[in-house]
Amino acid sequence: MFDVLTRLSDPPAVLTSPAVVSVRLESVSVRFRMPRERYSGLKELAVRWAQGRFETIDIWALRQVSLTLSAGEIFGVVGVNGAGKTTLLKAIAGVLHPTEGRIWVQGSVAPLLELGAGFHPELTGRENLYLYGTLLGNSRRQLRQAYDSIVDFAELDSFMDAPLRTYSSGMAARLAFAVATHRRADVLLVDEVLAVGDVHFQEKCRRRMEEFRTEGATILLVSHDPGLLTQMCDRVAWLADGRVVAIGAADEIVERYLAIG
Amino acid sequence: MLDCQPMPIPHAGSPLAASPLLFYDSAARATPFIEEGLALARYRDLVPQLVARSVKTRYKRSFLGVAWTMVNPLLTMLVLTFVFSQLFRYPSAQYALYVLTGLLAWNFFAQTTTAAMGDLIWSGGLIGRISLPKSVFAVAAVGTGLVNLLLALVPFAVIAVLAGGQVFSPALLLLPLPILLLAMFALGIGLTVSSLAIYFADVMPTYEVLLTVWFYLTPIIYPVDLLPPAVAAVLRLNPMYYLVTMFRSILVEGRLPPPEVLLVAGVSSLVMLLFGWWTFTRKAREYAYHV
């Protein structure tokens, strides 16, 4: 994926005009609450609860995160495993509703994380295209109209009637990427773990994202790879333990991250 | 792509309010009761896709494939008819039809409510990975149940005609009514148990046991007039009694049940649906945290 992004062109002229807010987070916190002990059943739980001994552990995956991204910006997020990077993407994608704070997103979102979630191995490529497409909120009509261009982009023309279990993982990833990006998005949420097919297809993905960006789309890129982030991003936020440690120019933040890390 | 177009009117104070574009604002919220309904309406094309997935994948690798959806109830009903009319020697074939219609209605209810729970929790943890209205799984479970019920009605009609029953009466035109009420009731129960099962893994096996109890508290395999009056009076507290009776009297007796049965069936279905929707949507935003 990262080769995909490294060669994006310079910011389009459009973006030199005063920045338009694309994504804004205000003191966003995300809390996972779980029972302190494992209860063997409802009965024990009810007893504990009645005794007032029901204890929970709070895990704050994000704490008081505030960010403002401008349209057309490539914004990176760096941090160790468990720092809250994926949670941040999920909160912006609307999967995890923030426990505290507020999130605004301008325009449509292409969540390029968990690509292919909802694919069923026994269904054909065509059936999965419609299933996954509607899971992402598209109408059937719209998918029918875009069908040829999706299949064309994924280069799966002769495989659409074969069950997905016969696909290689690269083929499935191509289909997922093609469906998730078949419409122009205003905000692309990209998780590092994304690996889409071979070099040739990565090049196509790169071009498609570049297209979106030329039209003013914002890209939020989450990565462990400092080199990639300095190369790609205008600004970077450093997350640790759910908190924003620093936000600033990519070089500077990544340098500080590496000095500590 | 995720269409972020939740609120027609920008929330006051939004820095983006001036823009005509679609947007997502985590703080903008109608009541959950209505918000979930609007979200479901936007995702309406997903429901048939989920129904198709369940129907197609159930017998996917078998030789008969989707035909099993009809063959399976046919064979089961043939066995039951044989058992009840030949082995138990009930006087009339009518009794076999009485049992079959009861089972059709009950299986629809039991399968739908169980699937609503299972699909929400086990659909590959989908609700923790993709932003979508959570009620879509319960609604799709009802849709799948309806497909199975309608397909099972075909072999039922064949058996009923062979057994000398009078399935094809003018009352048959009213069959959508009990089916609609059953679907509403099942959706209400399905949503209620789903909202509990998200938090407590014990709910699912507990519900399966309760279903067995509920099955025997509903006159499905026994005639209600065999019971002592006191017991029959208790059964009348069970909404499924009215729903099954309604479904059955149209299919077996070719007429609508008495108005009080219609009234209780209608009111309890509506109340259960509203209750289930309210219970489920109240906490729907938290569910992604618990899968």
Image: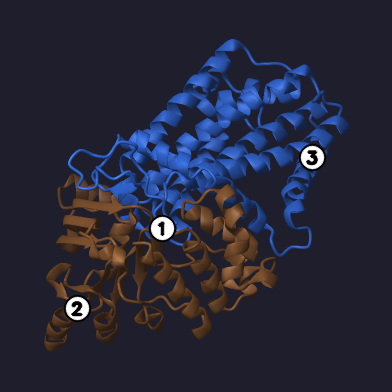
Chain colours: A brown, B blue
Q: Residue at x 23, y 69 (%)?
A: A84
User: Is residue A151 shown above or below A79?
Assistant: above
Check residue A83 in the rendering and tell me which mark sits there, or answer none: none
Q: Amino acid at mark 2?
A: Ala
Q: Amino acid at mark 3?
A: Pro
Disc 3 target residue: B155
User: Is residue B21 shown above or below B93?
Assistant: below
**Mark 3 vs mark 2, CA separation in Å:** 68 Å
Left or right of residue B13: residue B116: right
* Name of the residue lying farthest toward the top: B259
Observer-nearest of A101 and A52? A101
Disc 2 target residue: A250
Observer-nearest of A184 and A27? A184
The lab-note entry on whether marks 3 and 1 share a chain reads yes
Disc 1 target residue: B130
Chain letter of the residue beneath label 2 in the structure image: A
Q: Quadrant of the N terminus of chain A?
A: bottom left
Counting from the top left corner in percent of width and height, residue A8 is at: 36, 77
User: Is residue A106 shown above or below A193?
Assistant: above
- The first of marks 3 and 1 along the sequence is 1
Q: Residues within 10 Å of mark 2 (few under 14, many from 20)?
A: many
Q: Residue at x 52, y 63 (%)?
A: A179
